[in-house]
Image (cartoon, grey):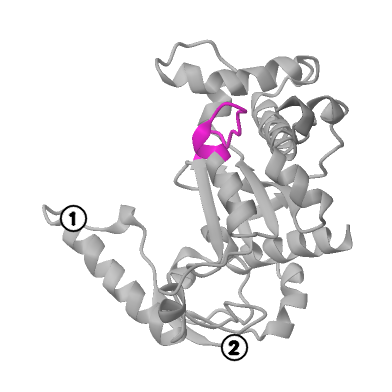
Amino acid sequence: MCACFSFISSLTRLSHYYLSPHHSPLPGSCTVDITRHSLKILSSLNERPSRSRFRSFTTQLPRHLNRHSSTQLFFQRRSLCSMSSSSDFFSELLQRNAAWAERTGNANPDLFPRNAKGQSPQILWIGCSDSRAGDGCLDLLPGDVFVHRNIANLLPYNDLSSLSVVQFAVDVLKVKHIVVCGHYDCGGVIACLGSKRLGLLDNWLRNLRDVRAKNKVELDKISDFREKVNRFVELNVIHQVHNLKKLSPVVDATKEGRIQVHGVVYDVASGRLKPLDIPEDPNADDYLVFEQDQSLE
């Protein structure tokens, strides 16, 4: 339990870092000097930077907490919304990629050569496809997180894509943590609180409507629509964590003590992760299956 709390706390602090300047504001930029031991104070930094201060700053942040000391990285990030409309849009994307590769490689010289030899992520991230709610909030590097995303971060028992990802991550990559991440203001959740037909998408969202039906009594008691959406998001994460824990690779890895499963919600309005208390699934034992008896073969 302590290790689980420590891991989620670390993820939460890293997401808070983006929104918490360490020094007084400087004109047009912010200088942050944080060593690996400085992460202890991140949770106490609550001030949010302005957009102008956040766009361009110099940082000394250990990108791999257990493998690197402080590394200096200067980067300027612009949203695609701020890019001038032009016929050569894709060329600008390639230019941004080249600049990112150079910055990242200079700050972490062994990163790309190491990634060229294979991957050994410790985290499987299962999240929503929403453009605002990816694993970038963890402030980790390429190779750190194995990722699966779909609409409304669902883990249906019959979805071969997500099932294959989980099996590969657990049995082959040997990840140590699985994070199921929902996010507030989820379009899939909002859609499932209504009854408008959406076409092919309705087949996928049927899984989410099952979550709504299962929690109908609790949700119907919430009169404020925004609060209902947020609670539905949280209930969905809890339900998907329960689904995840019923999968054979996760069951086996959990028994062996080599994996932990976490449920979190990303707040698109603040950029911060909220860890959820996941209650025990009262029906979990009804879904346990074991290797077939040899005498039956």
Secondary structure at numbered mark 2: loop
Where residue 34 sits, quadrant-wise, is bottom right
Q: Which mark is residue 89?
A: 1
Front: mark 1 or 2: 2
**Is 71 left or right of 266, judged from the image as shown?**
left
Image: 111 above or below 262 = below
Q: Quadrant of residue 198?
A: top left
Give the residue at x 88% y 28%.
Answer: 282
- Point out residue 28 in the picture as x, y percentages from the top left corner: 43, 77
Q: Is residue 83 visible?
A: yes
Residue sitting at x 70%, y 60% = 176
Residue 286 sits inside the magenta stretch:
no
Q: Amino acid at mark 2?
A: Ser
In the image, residue 1 lies at what x, y percent? 88, 57
Q: In terms of depth relative to the viewer, which is nearer, 74 or 153?
A: 153
* Residue 244 point in image, percent of width and height: 69, 38
Identify residue type, mark 1. Answer: Phe
Disc number placed over residue 70 in the picture, else none: 2
**Is 153 included in the stretch rendered in magenta?**
yes
Q: Residue at x 60, y 77 (%)?
A: 64
* Secondary structure mostly seen in the magenta stretch: loop
In the rendered view, would you say 193 is above or below 176? above
Say which element carries label 1: helix
Q: Is residue 133 visible?
A: no
Q: Which residues are magenta?
A: 150-163
Q: Is residue 102 left or right of residue 238?
A: left
Q: Nearer the viewer, residue 34 or 199?
A: 199
Q: CA distance from mark 1 to mark 2?
A: 35 Å
Q: For the residues labelled 1 and 2, say whether their Cβ atoms are less than 8 Å apart.
A: no
165 to 197, vertically: above or below: below
* Residue 83 coordinates in the image, percent (x, y): 26, 58
Within-10-Å neighbours for mark 1: few <14, some 14–19, many 20+:
few
